[in-house]
Image (cartoon, helix red, strand yellow):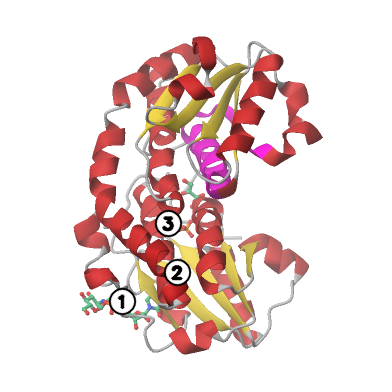
Amino acid sequence: MRGRLLRGGSCKAKTVLLGGLKDHLKTIRQSRRIVFIGCGTSYNAALAARPILEELSGIPVTMEIASDLLDRQGPIYREDTAVFVSQSGETADTLSALEYALENGALCVGITNTVDSAIARNTHCGVHLNAGAEIGVASTKAYTSQIVVMAMLALAIGGDTISNQARREAIIDGVFELPNKVREVLKLDEMMKDLAQELIAHQSLLVFGRGYNYATSLEGALKVKEVALMHSEGILAGEMKHGPLALVDETLPTFVIATRDACFSKQQSVIQQLRARKGRLIVMCSKGDAASVCPGGSCRVIEVPQLEDCLQPVVNIIPLQLLAYHLTVLRGFNVDQPRNLAKSVTTQ
Ligand code: UD1
Ligand code: F6R
């Protein structure tokens, strides 16, 4: 991944260079707000990147699902930077939202995987993912590449101050560690196949996440839903007591993402509360944390390698992608071409 992804942009000598943005960084830094706009998996990737962009840039970052922005005719201002995230660069809603943002005078930035796509052509500037063509309908490598590119975007916009130097260097080191961590997490394939076998006959799956991994819960659930055709819901763990807890019982498979980051202790408490309701838990945690997240082996545990928090979603989504893949194959569906879906949604 590193070779392709960093072909254009690069993280050499602990600095980030995104060739397509370098002439626009000053304007972006002066914007009043950054608005991420996308659909489906691309929206989820932007959600994963939002916290690091807020932290490093200090600029408010808001999120828009393209169709919803258009339905509401939501406010977009000249002082905004609107970032359009799209693998194909051709999604009709995202493209219409781009036209709308251009009319409203915002600086429009594209993050696309397709050179010469409509979004790449019509944005003022942007970044190509260089992840290679994505053929399967379900977006997978584009998702992980989008997160890495948006972390690089956060580093580029954030600027190099003494106060954030250690954090910046840790993220850049993390980018270089990613290929090994991804190789390591792919070794969970057999374990996810066994889990898929266990879950094959279930009707539904919940995925609880928060912070950097709220996006992982939405994206994991989306993958299970769209390819394995199993109802699945990604839930912000902070919302658990505001409704979803009513669903939890000893039969419904309930995934909790509890890798190490600033939200870890809150997720430990979520696990305790779910265990108190006899939830059928599958917990994803950092290597070495199995005993502390699940004392007494009371739930199934998936241990993943740890990484800088903002890059952790790249690793954490992989077991869920593998689970979706195996569920699909075991249920006899087509993993490359899910029912009723098209790779590029070019109509509204
Ligand atoms: C460019 C080359 C890359 C080469 C590198 C060498 C292309 C497409 N890219 O990459 O092959 O290795 O120089 O330095 O020839 N853009 C948008 N909207 C988007 C995406 C991109 O406007 O959604 C614009 C960028 O602002 C830029 C151009 O397209 O002007 C190319 O973008 P990108 O490939 O990311 O730029 P470089 O990294 O400079
Ligand atoms: C899900 C999936 C879709 C796309 C969405 C946006 O796996 O692929 O949710 O992410 O249709 O597509 P792009 O990124 O091409 O704008």
Q: Which residues are magenta?
A: 212-237
In the image, is the residue at mark 1 within 8 Å of ligand 1 by its beta carbon? yes
Q: Which is in the foreground here, disc 1 or disc 3?
A: 1
Q: Nearer the viewer, residue 60 or 230?
A: 60
- Left of 176 or right of it: where is 202? right
Which amino acid lies under the numbered mark 1 shown in the image of this protein?
Answer: Leu
- The three-letter code of the residue at mark 2 reads Asn
**Of label 1 and label 3, which has the lower sequence position?**
1
For this view, does 123 lie left or right of residue 166? right
| Disc 1 element | loop
Q: What residue is pinned by disc 1?
A: 17
For mark 3, does the 10 Å Cα neighbourhood hold few (<14), some (14 to 19), or many (20 or more) residues? many
Q: Which comes sooner in the sequence, label 2 or label 1?
A: 1
Q: Given contact means CB atoms under 8 Å apart, are the residues at marks 2 and 3 in contact? A: no
> Which residue lies at the image location 51% right of the left edge and 88% below the top edge?
27
Judging by the rendered image, the residue that carries numbered circle 2 is 164
Where is residue 221 shown, x and y percent of the image?
Answer: 55, 36
Label 1: few (<14), some (14–19) or many (≥20) C-alpha neighbours in 10 Å: some
* Residue linked to disc 3: 147
